Amino acid sequence: NAGVTQTPKFQVLKTGQSMTLQCAQDMNHEYMSWYRQDPGMGLRLIHYSVGAGITDQGEVPNGYNVSRSTTEDFPLRLLSAAPSQTSVYFCASSYSQGRTDTQYFGPGTRLTVL
Amino acid sequence: GQQVMQIPQYQHVQEGEDFTTYCNSSTTLSNIQWYKQRPGGHPVFLIQLVKSGEVKKQKRLTFQFGEAKKNSSLHITATQTTDVGTYFCAGTEGYSTLTFGKGTMLLVSP
Protein backbone atom coordinates (compact mmCIF):
# COMPACT_ATOMS: atom_id res chain seq x y z
CA ASN A 1 0.00 0.00 0.00
CA ALA A 2 1.18 3.51 -0.80
CA GLY A 3 -0.76 4.90 2.18
CA VAL A 4 -1.60 8.61 1.86
CA THR A 5 -0.07 10.40 -1.09
CA GLN A 6 0.01 14.13 -1.78
CA THR A 7 0.94 16.13 -4.84
CA PRO A 8 2.72 18.37 -5.45
CA LYS A 9 5.47 18.30 -2.82
CA PHE A 10 6.33 21.96 -3.36
CA GLN A 11 4.43 24.82 -5.01
CA VAL A 12 4.96 28.53 -5.46
CA LEU A 13 1.97 30.67 -6.37
CA LYS A 14 1.37 34.32 -6.98
CA THR A 15 -1.31 36.16 -5.06
CA GLY A 16 -4.69 35.60 -6.68
CA GLN A 17 -3.82 32.37 -8.43
CA SER A 18 -5.85 29.25 -7.80
CA MET A 19 -4.68 25.68 -7.48
CA THR A 20 -5.66 22.25 -6.24
CA LEU A 21 -3.67 20.19 -3.79
CA GLN A 22 -4.21 16.51 -4.42
CA CYS A 23 -4.60 13.83 -1.76
CA ALA A 24 -5.27 10.14 -2.24
CA GLN A 25 -5.30 7.10 0.02
CA ASP A 26 -5.44 3.41 -0.82
CA MET A 27 -6.42 2.09 2.61
CA ASN A 28 -10.20 2.31 2.05
CA HIS A 29 -10.45 4.84 4.87
CA GLU A 30 -13.76 6.64 5.31
CA TYR A 31 -12.42 9.69 7.14
CA MET A 32 -10.11 12.19 5.44
CA SER A 33 -8.97 15.62 6.50
CA TRP A 34 -6.76 18.55 5.60
CA TYR A 35 -4.51 20.38 8.06
CA ARG A 36 -2.21 23.33 7.72
CA GLN A 37 0.94 23.63 9.80
CA ASP A 38 2.49 26.99 10.54
CA PRO A 39 5.48 27.64 12.83
CA GLY A 40 4.42 27.64 16.46
CA MET A 41 0.77 26.98 15.57
CA GLY A 42 0.62 23.21 15.51
CA LEU A 43 -1.78 21.48 13.14
CA ARG A 44 -5.04 23.25 12.37
CA LEU A 45 -7.94 21.51 10.72
CA ILE A 46 -9.16 23.08 7.47
CA HIS A 47 -11.83 20.68 6.18
CA TYR A 48 -12.75 17.07 6.75
CA SER A 49 -14.91 14.35 5.27
CA VAL A 50 -16.55 11.37 6.95
CA GLY A 51 -17.24 9.64 3.65
CA ALA A 52 -17.79 10.12 -0.06
CA GLY A 53 -20.15 13.01 -0.73
CA ILE A 54 -19.89 14.43 2.80
CA THR A 55 -17.61 17.29 3.81
CA ASP A 56 -17.53 19.75 6.68
CA GLN A 57 -15.53 22.74 7.85
CA GLY A 58 -12.79 22.63 10.41
CA GLU A 59 -11.15 25.38 12.41
CA VAL A 60 -9.73 27.45 9.51
CA PRO A 61 -11.84 26.83 6.36
CA ASN A 62 -11.87 30.32 4.81
CA GLY A 63 -10.26 30.49 1.37
CA TYR A 64 -10.39 26.74 0.82
CA ASN A 65 -12.86 24.37 -0.84
CA VAL A 66 -13.04 20.60 -0.78
CA SER A 67 -15.06 17.85 -2.37
CA ARG A 68 -15.16 14.08 -1.88
CA SER A 69 -16.50 12.31 -4.96
CA THR A 70 -14.71 9.03 -4.20
CA THR A 71 -13.50 7.28 -1.06
CA GLU A 72 -9.90 7.51 -2.26
CA ASP A 73 -9.52 11.18 -3.19
CA PHE A 74 -9.91 14.39 -1.22
CA PRO A 75 -8.58 17.43 -3.13
CA LEU A 76 -8.14 20.84 -1.50
CA ARG A 77 -8.74 23.89 -3.66
CA LEU A 78 -7.33 27.33 -3.03
CA LEU A 79 -9.70 29.72 -4.74
CA SER A 80 -7.56 32.88 -4.79
CA ALA A 81 -4.23 32.40 -3.08
CA ALA A 82 -3.08 34.90 -0.47
CA PRO A 83 0.31 35.22 1.29
CA SER A 84 -1.43 34.18 4.54
CA GLN A 85 -1.94 30.77 2.96
CA THR A 86 1.79 30.13 2.83
CA SER A 87 2.07 26.99 4.89
CA VAL A 88 2.71 23.26 4.91
CA TYR A 89 -0.45 21.32 4.11
CA PHE A 90 -1.00 17.79 5.35
CA CYS A 91 -3.73 15.42 4.29
CA ALA A 92 -4.68 12.65 6.71
CA SER A 93 -6.97 9.66 6.69
CA SER A 94 -8.33 7.25 9.26
CA TYR A 95 -10.47 4.14 9.26
CA SER A 96 -13.73 5.60 10.46
CA GLN A 97 -14.45 8.09 13.22
CA GLY A 98 -11.40 10.26 12.79
CA ARG A 99 -11.46 11.50 16.34
CA THR A 100 -10.71 8.11 17.90
CA ASP A 101 -8.81 6.39 15.14
CA THR A 102 -5.16 6.57 14.16
CA GLN A 103 -4.56 9.39 11.72
CA TYR A 104 -2.29 8.50 8.80
CA PHE A 105 -0.64 11.59 7.38
CA GLY A 106 0.65 12.20 3.89
CA PRO A 107 4.13 13.64 3.26
CA GLY A 108 2.82 17.21 2.94
CA THR A 109 2.77 19.99 0.36
CA ARG A 110 4.92 23.04 1.03
CA LEU A 111 3.14 26.05 -0.45
CA THR A 112 4.54 29.55 -0.82
CA VAL A 113 2.32 32.41 -1.96
CA LEU A 114 4.15 35.50 -3.16
CA GLY B 1 -13.81 25.98 21.10
CA GLN B 2 -11.81 23.17 22.50
CA GLN B 3 -8.18 24.00 23.22
CA VAL B 4 -5.30 21.72 23.98
CA MET B 5 -2.27 23.38 25.52
CA GLN B 6 1.15 21.80 25.34
CA ILE B 7 4.29 22.70 27.30
CA PRO B 8 7.12 23.31 26.93
CA GLN B 9 7.26 24.65 23.38
CA TYR B 10 10.89 23.67 23.06
CA GLN B 11 13.45 21.63 25.01
CA HIS B 12 17.10 20.98 24.40
CA VAL B 13 18.66 18.07 26.30
CA GLN B 14 21.92 16.17 26.33
CA GLU B 15 21.75 12.62 25.14
CA GLY B 16 20.94 10.36 28.06
CA GLU B 17 18.83 12.93 29.91
CA ASP B 18 15.12 12.44 30.42
CA PHE B 19 12.43 14.50 28.71
CA THR B 20 8.79 15.18 29.50
CA THR B 21 6.12 17.07 27.61
CA TYR B 22 2.73 17.93 29.06
CA CYS B 23 -0.66 18.35 27.47
CA ASN B 24 -3.54 20.16 29.20
CA SER B 25 -7.16 20.74 28.32
CA SER B 26 -9.75 22.96 30.02
CA THR B 27 -12.40 20.35 29.27
CA THR B 28 -12.66 16.62 29.81
CA LEU B 29 -11.28 14.67 26.88
CA SER B 30 -12.73 11.48 25.44
CA ASN B 31 -9.31 10.32 24.33
CA ILE B 32 -5.85 11.63 23.66
CA GLN B 33 -3.39 10.71 20.95
CA TRP B 34 0.32 11.39 20.64
CA TYR B 35 2.22 11.92 17.41
CA LYS B 36 5.87 12.46 16.52
CA GLN B 37 7.07 14.56 13.61
CA ARG B 38 10.70 14.33 12.55
CA PRO B 39 12.25 17.49 11.05
CA GLY B 40 10.99 17.88 7.50
CA GLY B 41 8.63 14.95 7.92
CA HIS B 42 5.00 14.31 8.64
CA PRO B 43 3.28 13.43 11.93
CA VAL B 44 3.36 9.75 12.80
CA PHE B 45 0.97 8.19 15.31
CA LEU B 46 2.55 6.94 18.52
CA ILE B 47 -0.28 5.94 20.83
CA GLN B 48 -3.84 6.57 22.01
CA LEU B 49 -5.06 6.75 25.60
CA VAL B 50 -8.73 6.39 26.45
CA LYS B 51 -9.17 5.45 30.11
CA SER B 52 -8.83 7.67 33.14
CA GLY B 53 -5.42 7.18 34.77
CA GLU B 54 -4.19 5.03 31.89
CA VAL B 55 -0.44 4.45 31.56
CA LYS B 56 1.15 2.91 28.48
CA LYS B 57 4.78 2.22 27.70
CA GLN B 58 6.64 1.86 24.44
CA LYS B 59 10.26 0.99 25.19
CA ARG B 60 11.71 4.24 26.63
CA LEU B 61 8.47 6.20 26.16
CA THR B 62 5.82 6.38 28.90
CA PHE B 63 2.42 7.92 28.25
CA GLN B 64 -0.05 8.89 30.95
CA PHE B 65 -3.66 10.08 30.88
CA GLY B 66 -4.76 12.02 33.96
CA GLU B 67 -7.42 10.82 36.35
CA ALA B 68 -9.72 13.67 35.35
CA LYS B 69 -8.96 13.08 31.65
CA LYS B 70 -7.90 16.71 31.28
CA ASN B 71 -4.17 16.22 31.00
CA SER B 72 -1.60 13.86 29.62
CA SER B 73 2.15 13.49 29.53
CA LEU B 74 4.83 11.83 27.46
CA HIS B 75 8.08 10.94 29.22
CA ILE B 76 11.18 9.74 27.42
CA THR B 77 13.82 8.03 29.54
CA ALA B 78 17.47 8.40 28.55
CA THR B 79 16.96 10.33 25.32
CA GLN B 80 18.79 9.38 22.15
CA THR B 81 19.53 11.48 19.07
CA THR B 82 16.86 9.50 17.25
CA ASP B 83 14.25 11.05 19.57
CA VAL B 84 14.72 14.46 17.93
CA GLY B 85 11.49 15.90 16.56
CA THR B 86 8.27 17.58 17.55
CA TYR B 87 5.81 15.73 19.75
CA PHE B 88 2.14 16.58 19.43
CA CYS B 89 -0.77 15.62 21.59
CA ALA B 90 -4.26 15.64 20.10
CA GLY B 91 -7.51 15.30 22.00
CA THR B 92 -11.20 14.93 21.41
CA GLU B 93 -14.03 16.32 23.50
CA GLY B 94 -17.24 14.38 23.04
CA TYR B 95 -18.06 14.23 19.35
CA SER B 96 -15.79 17.08 18.32
CA THR B 97 -13.00 16.70 15.81
CA LEU B 98 -9.47 15.98 16.92
CA THR B 99 -7.68 19.09 18.22
CA PHE B 100 -3.91 19.22 18.15
CA GLY B 101 -1.67 20.98 20.62
CA LYS B 102 1.06 23.25 19.25
CA GLY B 103 3.71 20.65 19.93
CA THR B 104 6.97 20.38 21.86
CA MET B 105 10.14 20.48 19.82
CA LEU B 106 12.86 18.23 21.26
CA LEU B 107 16.50 18.69 20.37
CA VAL B 108 19.00 16.13 21.63
CA SER B 109 22.72 16.89 21.61
CA PRO B 110 25.16 13.97 21.50
Image (cartoon, coloured by chain):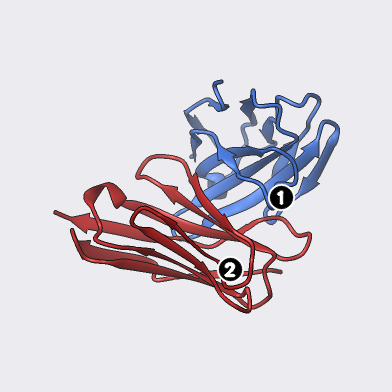
Chain colours: A blue, B red
Q: Residue at x 47, y 28 (%)?
A: A9
The location of residue B96, given as percent across then percent down, is 75, 60
Q: Residue at x 37, y 45 (%)?
A: B38
Subunit of label 1: A
Cα–Cα gap, marks 1 and 2: 22 Å
Q: Quadrant of the N terminus of chain B?
A: bottom right
For the residue labelled by badge 2, is the local secondary structure a helix, a strand or a loop?
A: strand
Q: Quadrant of the C terminus of chain B?
A: bottom left
The image quadrant that residue A59 belongs to is bottom right
- Residue named by callout 1: A62
Left or right of A61: which side holds B76? left
The location of residue B26, given as percent across then percent down, is 64, 78
Subunit of label 2: B
Q: As displayed, is residue B71 above or below residue A74? A: below
Amino acid type, residue under disc 1 in the picture:
Asn
Amino acid type, residue under disc 2 in the picture:
Val
Q: Residue at x 27, y 66 (%)?
A: B18
The location of residue A13, given as percent across then percent down, is 52, 32
Category of crowding for the residue at label 1, using alpha-carbon neighbours closer than 10 angstroms: few (below 14), some (14–19), many (at least 20)? few
Q: Say which of marks 1 and 2 sits in front.
A: 2
Which residue is the extreme one toward the left? B110
Q: Nearer the viewer, residue B28 or B65?
A: B65
Left or right of B32: which side holds B22? left
Which residue is the extreme one toward the top? A1
| Res B4 label | 2
Q: Nearer the viewer, residue B73 or B87?
A: B73
